[in-house]
Image (cartoon, rainbow, N blue to C red):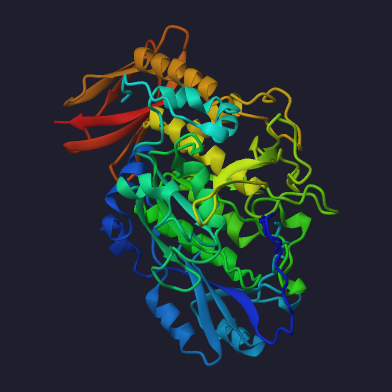
């Protein structure tokens, strides 16, 4: 695993690997119905609201891993449980090879996947994957004194959103990194502290609540989004709120870090986080037998990338650094930048030319990567002592972009993560001719805002469902230029109960069979969609 940290180098002494790492996948979740009946046992109200706003139903992945399965595995001599994932219904274990193989005898174990693929055999032992670690609108105008940080914001036209008071307020960002020392004490983060914008965090590596520790990389990453020092540094989302999660173990390079990241992403989901920023990437590890291959950069193979894709399916936006290996013999993106829905961010200079270190695409299955670009050379950040310094790397272009995503989403709180992601891509300067160095290019977030406002106005003015509240039926009004559309109606839990095609001649939807209550709807036509609630009286 090659870290994205360009300001220092790590020297690791490798002595041997008597113990192995593996993922243990389970067959089922026997207590699923209990959780489906009580969703707030799994999700916070904010997370529940985010799901409902995007018509995302609960499913099997949301159910916690069966506790009795974990207990039985824990009782096996020589086995240590390192992490767990409800999304993938798996745990990460460490122990002797023989002890891990013995786990396959449990009837509830579906398969065991060793990090060292050479240890995987036919039967319950799955074929392993390999890795390389590489590195409402207020009228008051906001006019920040950006100082030296102005270029990294103005390159994206982010200052124009700030001037309209789109500063990330109301959006929650989870930062996954290696440590956040100084965030609780130094001046660039005082504004966050005074306004209670640090909502909490967790150290998944040490399994404790002290997240103001570790390496300062996370501190600098956070500063590019939430930092504030007048005339020196203004983050791209200074009014967003943040959770700080340590998932990166800086003392070793091990695939358990992927598992810890997935566990943290699940926690972020349950807390109602909107955006996950990850300035980490994985390709190779201390034990070379664990290394990923380029062929695995297909978005569907590695544990972390599969977790990232599930995170997106829960309604969050994931912004990750593309990687810093562009100038090496292996210049490609790393995990989880390869995931389909992840917004992978490469790095350009202050003059908008690609940096020598920015990792390149495509993904191994031929998709455009990175997705977009932002300033990652001479980015202005804070260090752990509160000094305003410059730093190089896609770990900074990523959070700079993540903050702007929060500002844009603040402007369109009813839009889905897919719609926000689409607006960003379509605003980018190479959208019509993307390539595997720049992706879709440098986004113009103000253009994305304008496009979104035009689309939102169009949808509001032309797609109408009425009467609402109603009793027995609703009528759907289509704009004159649309011939057909489709209306979907869901229960508050996300279960689809109606799917009906509508036209200008046939636009009545019967609700007679439905009980009184609140329902969710989604109207779609030619790439446009509108969501909302229907009250049946």
**Camera-side residue: 33 or 237?**
237
Residue 93 is situated, as x and y percent measured from the top left of the image, at 56, 78
Residue 20 is situated, as x and y percent measured from the top left of the image, at 65, 81
Residue ID at (41%, 31%): 415
Looking at the rendered structure, the number of numbered marks drawn on it comes to 0
Asked if one can make out residue 87 in the rendered structure from this viewpoint, the answer is no
Q: Residue furthest top?
A: 480
Residue ID at (68%, 32%): 350
Q: Residue furthest left?
A: 537
Residue 110 is situated, as x and y percent measured from the top left of the image, at 55, 73
Residue ID at (39%, 41%): 240
On screen, residue 371 versus residue 493, left or right, reads right
* Residue 73 versus residue 145 in the image, above or below: below
Q: Quadrant of the N terminus?
A: bottom right
Residue 144 is situated, as x and y percent measured from the top left of the image, at 44, 29
Q: Quadrant of the C terminus?
A: top left
* Residue 404 versus residue 26 in the image, above or below: above
Would you identify the image quadrant in which residue 519 lies? top left
**Camera-side residue: 434 or 438?**
438
On screen, residue 533 versus residue 298, left or right, reads left
* Residue 196 versus residue 169 in the image, above or below: below
Residue ID at (56%, 64%): 248
Q: Residue furthest right?
A: 329
On screen, residue 284 versus residue 242, left or right, reads right
Asked if one can make out residue 521 in the rendered structure from this viewpoint, the answer is yes
């Amino acid at each position: 695993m090659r870290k994205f940290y360009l300001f220092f180098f790590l020297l690791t002494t490798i002595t041997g690997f008597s113990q192995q790492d593996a993922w243990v996948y389970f067959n089922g979740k026997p207590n699923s119905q209990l959780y489906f009946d009580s969703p707030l046992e799994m999700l916070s109200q904010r997370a529940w609201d985010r799901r409902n706003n995007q018509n995302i139903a609960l499913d099997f992945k949301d159910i916690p891993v069966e506790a009795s399965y974990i207990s039985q595995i824990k009782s096996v001599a020589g086995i240590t449980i390192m992490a767990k994932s409800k999304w993938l219904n798996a745990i990460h274990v460490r122990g002797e090879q023989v002890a891990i193989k013995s786990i396959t005898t449990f009837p509830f174990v579906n398969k065991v996947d060793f990090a060292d693929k050479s240890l995987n055999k036919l039967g319950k032992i799955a074929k392993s994957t390999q890795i390389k670690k590489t590195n409402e609108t207020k009228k008051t105008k906001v006019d920040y004194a950006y100082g030296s940080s102005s270029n990294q914001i103005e390159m994206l036209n982010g200052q124009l959103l700030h001037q309209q008071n789109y500063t990330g307020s109301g959006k929650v960002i989870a930062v996954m990194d290696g440590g956040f020392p100084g965030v609780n004490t130094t001046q660039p983060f005082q504004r966050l502290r005074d306004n209670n914008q640090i909502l909490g965090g967790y150290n998944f590596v040490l399994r404790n609540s002290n997240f103001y520790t570790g390496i300062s990389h996370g501190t600098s990453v956070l500063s590019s989004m939430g930092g504030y020092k007048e005339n020196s540094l203004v983050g791209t989302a200074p009014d967003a709120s943040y959770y700080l999660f340590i998932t990166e173990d800086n003392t070793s390079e091990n695939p358990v870090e992927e598992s810890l990241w997935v566990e943290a992403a699940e926690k972020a989901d349950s807390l109602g986080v909107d955006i996950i920023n990850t300035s980490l990437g994985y390709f190779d590890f201390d034990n070379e037998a664990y290394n990923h291959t380029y062929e695995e950069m297909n978005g569907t193979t590695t544990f972390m990338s599969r977790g990232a894709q599930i995170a997106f399916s829960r309604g969050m936006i994931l912004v990750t650094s593309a990687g810093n290996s562009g100038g090496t013999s292996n210049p490609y993106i790393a995990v989880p930048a390869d995931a389909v829905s992840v917004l992978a961010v490469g790095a350009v200079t202050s003059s908008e030319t690609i940096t020598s270190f920015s990792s390149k695409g495509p993904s191994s299955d031929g998709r455009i990567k990175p997705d977009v670009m932002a300033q990652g050379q001479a980015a202005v950040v804070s260090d752990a002592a509160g000094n305003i310094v410059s730093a190089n790397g896609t770990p900074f272009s990523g959070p700079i972009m993540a903050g702007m995503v929060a500002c844009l989403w603040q402007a369109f709180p009813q839009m889905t993560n897919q719609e926000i992601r689409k607006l960003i891509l379509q605003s980018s300067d190479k959208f019509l001719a993307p390539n595997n160095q720049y992706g879709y290019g440098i986004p113009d977030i103000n253009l994305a805002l304008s496009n979104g406002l035009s689309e939102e106005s169009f949808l509001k003015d032309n797609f109408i469902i009425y009467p609402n509240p109603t009793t027995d039926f609703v009528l759907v009004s289509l704009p004159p230029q649309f011939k057909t559309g489709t209306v979907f109606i869901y229960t508050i839990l996300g279960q689809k109960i109606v799917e009906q095609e509508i036209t200008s001649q046939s636009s009545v939807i019967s609700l007679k069979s439905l009980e009184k209550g609140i329902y969710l709807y989604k109207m779609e036509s030619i790439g446009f969609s509108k969501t909302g609630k229907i009250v049946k009286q």
